Amino acid sequence: MLSKTGIDFPRVWVGSLVVMAACCLASMPANAADMKLVCLLDDSVTHSQRALEIVFNERAQYVTVNGKTAIAGISDARITFRVELSAGAPLDFVVDRSLGAINITSSNSSPKTRMIYTGQCKTADST
């Protein structure tokens, strides 16, 4: 409906609403739901230590490790996922959220599951 001035008020109102919504979304952090865990791992074979950073999103149910993203099962108690960090070697990750304990296993090398790394994780600043 045009006013006496020739302005279509419903279109102006909808346009203003879209601009306001875009401004609100732009002001929010891009990854507001992402959380970062920093884990110190012990190699079960060589007994060497290494650090690992895991970014997870509880709402979207995914994790990112070393640039590889995977679907995850994330609950209040644990985070479970499988990621192939090197060619042909998928690893199964289980993080106990209440204790901060992490276990990384591989079932690729033999019929039984083999423990590769164990360690502790702590929450870092969110990304």
Image: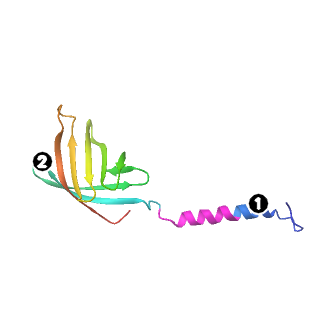
Q: Give the residue furthest to the left.
A: 46
Please tell me whether the stretch drawn in magenta is mainly helix, strand or loop: helix
- Residue 55 in the image, given as x and y percentages of width and height: 34, 56
What is the distance, in whole Å, between disc 2 and disc 1 at their CAs? 65 Å
Above-or-below relation of 67 to 127: above
Q: Which residue is mark 2?
A: 44
Three-letter amino acid code of the residue under disc 1: Arg
Q: Nearer the viewer, residue 64 or 58?
A: 58
Q: Quadrant of the N terminus?
A: bottom right
Image quadrant where residue 2 sits: bottom right
Q: Which residue is mark 1?
A: 11
Q: How was the colour assigned to the protein in this rendering? A: rainbow
Would you say 38 lies left or right of 3 here? left
Q: Residue at x 17, y 45 (%)?
A: 116
Asked whether the viewer can see residue 69, the reply is no
Instruction: Label 1: state its secondary structure.
Output: helix
- Specify start and end residues of the magenta stretch as a single range: 16-29
Q: Give the residue furthest to the front.
A: 77
- Disc 2 or 1, which lies upstream in sequence? 1
- Residue 64 in the image, given as x and y percentages of width and height: 35, 51
